[in-house]
C-alpha cells in the first residue's frame, strides 16, 4: 500500500491549499475534517485543481475510536496537524472550549501515532506564541508568552510535541509558526470562507470591497510605525502551503524537533494593504480610523532565515499577488 500523509483540518483555508501542494508534489493525502469551520464543497475543488481524487473522512480528531480505525485502514507515514479552533476573541470568551478541543486533539493524535509507529509530524503553530515581541524581526529563539487562550493552546501543543520528541528520539516533528496567511489559490477555486463574520484584515477588506460591509475600521493610527497603523508579516497562502511540503521533506529525512517561522520577513501596515488592494484590483475600500484593538501589537514580523537554511524555502509572492488572489476568490465566493 502506498504510504500517505494524514492531513487534519484539510478542508479548511490552510488545509485545502496544503492538500493541493502535497498532491502536486506527489504525496497521497488523507484528509480528516469535522467541517466545524469548513465545508465538504472544497473537496471537489481540490480535485478540479489537482486532477486527482481526494480521500476525505468526516471525523473529529478527538474521537479516538475513529482515529484508530483510520490508522488501521490506510497506510500513514506522516501527519500534518492543522485541525483546531482559531478565533482569538472566542477563545477569550470561552477558554475551556479551546483548551478542551485543541489540546485534546493534539494529545489524541500523538497517542494514536505512537500506537501505530508513525513518527513524522508537522504541527500548525502560530506567531501568536511570541505575544508582545521584544525584538522584531522575531527569531524562533525569542521569548514566548501568549495574550489569549488560543495562543496558549498552540504553545502548550508545541510543548507536548517537544516532550514526545524527547521521550522518543526517533520521532520527528516540525513546529511551524505561521505569521499572517492571506490570499487564495490563483484559480479562484479555493480560499478563505470562515463560517463566522470576518475579523481578520484581509477577509474584512474583501467584504468591504464586495459591498457586504460599509467600511473597514482601522484599529489605531497612533502606533509607533511610519504611518501609525499596525504592521504585519503577510504571507501568501500558496507560499505557506509550499512551506509545508518542504517541512514534510525535511521531517522524512531527519529525526528530532525543529521550530520554524513561516513568514515573508517583510512587514506591511494596514494602510499599505488597503492602498495596494485598491490599486491592483481597481476597487474602493472605504475606511475609518477607530481605537486600538485590545491585544494588538504595533509590529509583528518574522525572521525567516531558519526556514531558508533548513527547508530551502522562502516566500516568493508579493503583496499585490496576495491582494489580487484574495479578491479573485471573493468574486467567486460572492457570485
Ligand atoms: N485590522 C484592522 N481592522 C480590522 C482587522 C484588522 O485595522 O478590521 C488590523 C489589526 O489591528 C492588525 C492587522 O490589521 O494591525 C492584522 O490583523 P489580523 O486580525 O488580520 O491579524 P492579527 O495579526 O491580529 O492575527 C493573526 C491571526 C491570529 C494569529 C496571529 C499571529 O488572526 O490567529 O495573526 O500573529 F495568531
Image (cartoon, grey):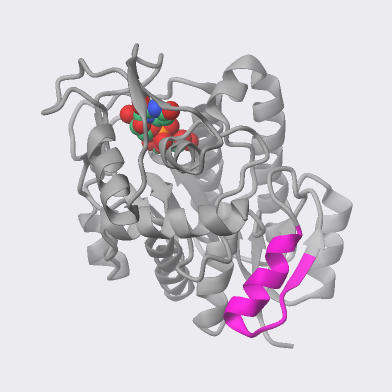
Q: Quadrant of the N terminus?
A: bottom right
**Residue 104 position (above or below residue 60):** above
Could you tell whether 35 is left or right of 242 in the image? right
Quadrant in which ligand 1 is drawn: top left
Could you tell whether 319 is left or right of 102 in the image? left
Could you tell whether 25 is left or right of 280 in the image? right
Q: What stretch is highlighted in magenta?
A: 40-56
Q: How many marks?
A: 0
**Residue furthest toward the left?**
226
- Give me the residue at 29% from left, 55% from top: 280
Q: Quadrant of residue 300?
A: top left
Camera-nearest residue between 63 and 17: 17
| Residue 86 point in image, percent of width and height | 58, 36
**Residue 235 position (above or below residue 308):** above
| Residue 137 point in image, percent of width and height | 19, 40
Could you tell whether 84 is left or right of 132 in the image? right
- Give me the residue at 56% from left, 41% from top: 160
Q: Quadrant of residue 224?
A: top left
Camera-nearest residue between 88 and 322: 322
| Residue 188 point in image, percent of width and height | 52, 65
- Give me the residue at 71% from left, 67% from top: 43
Residue 79 belongs to magenta span: no
| Residue 317 point in image, percent of width and height | 29, 63
Q: In which quarter of the image is the C terminus?
A: bottom right
Any part of residue 131 in sight: no
- Give me the residue at 63% from left, 37% from top: 85
Any part of residue 283 in sight: yes
Camera-nearest residue between 242 and 321: 321
Amino acid at each position: 500500500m502506498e504510504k500517505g500523509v494524514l492531513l487534519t483540518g484539510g478542508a479548511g483555508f490552510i488545509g485545502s491549499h496544503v492538500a493541493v501542494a502535497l498532491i502536486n508534489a506527489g504525496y497521497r493525502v488523507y484528509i480528516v475534517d469535522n467541517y466545524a469551520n469548513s465545508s465538504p464543497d472544497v473537496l471537489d475543488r481540490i480535485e478540479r485543481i489537482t486532477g486527482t481524487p481526494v480521500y476525505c473522512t468526516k471525523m473529529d480528531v478527538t474521537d479516538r475510536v475513529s482515529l484508530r480505525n483510520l490508522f488501521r485502514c490506510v497506510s500513514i507515514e506522516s501527519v500534518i496537524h492543522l485541525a483546531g479552533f482559531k478565533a482569538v476573541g472566542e477563545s477569550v470568551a470561552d477558554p475551556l472550549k479551546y483548551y478542551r478541543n485543541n489540546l485534546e486533539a493534539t494529545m489524541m493524535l500523538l497517542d494514536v501515532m505512537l500506537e501505530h509507529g508513525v513518527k513524522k509530524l508537522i504541527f500548525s503553530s502560530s506567531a501568536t506564541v511570541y505575544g508582545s515581541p521584544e525584538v522584531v524581526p522575531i527569531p524562533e529563539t525569542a521569548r514566548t508568552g501568549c495574550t489569549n487562550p488560543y495562543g496558549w493552546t498552540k504553545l502548550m501543543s508545541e510543548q507536548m510535541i517537544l516532550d514526545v520528541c524527547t521521550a522518543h528520539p526517533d520521532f520527528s516533528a516540525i513546529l511551524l509558526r505561521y505569521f499572517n496567511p492571506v490570499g487564495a489559490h490563483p484559480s479562484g477555486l479555493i480560499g478563505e470562507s470562515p463560517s463566522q463574520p470576518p475579523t481578520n484584515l484581509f477577509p474584512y477588506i474583501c467584504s468591504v470591497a464586495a459591498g457586504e460591509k460599509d467600511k473597514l475600521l482601522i484599529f489605531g493610527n497612533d502606533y509607533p510605525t511610519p504611518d501609525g497603523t499596525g504592521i504585519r508579516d503577510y504571507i501568501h497562502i500558496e507560499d505557506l502551503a509550499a512551506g509545508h511540503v518542504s517541512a514534510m521533506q525535511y521531517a522524512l529525512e531527519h529525526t528530532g524537533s525543529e521550530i520554524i517561522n513561516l513568514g515573508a520577513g517583510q512587514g506591511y501596515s494596514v494602510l499599505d494593504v488597503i492602498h495596494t488592494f485598491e490599486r491592483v484590483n481597481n476597487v474602493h475600500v472605504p475606511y475609518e480610523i477607530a481605537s486600538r484593538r485590545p491585544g494588538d501589537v504595533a509590529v509583528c514580523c518574522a525572521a525567516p532565515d531558519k526556514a531558508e537554511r533548513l527547508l530551502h524555502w522562502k516566500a516568493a509572492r508579493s503583496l499585490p499577488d496576495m491582494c489580487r488572489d484574495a479578491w479573485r476568490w471573493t468574486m467567486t465566493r460572492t457570485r
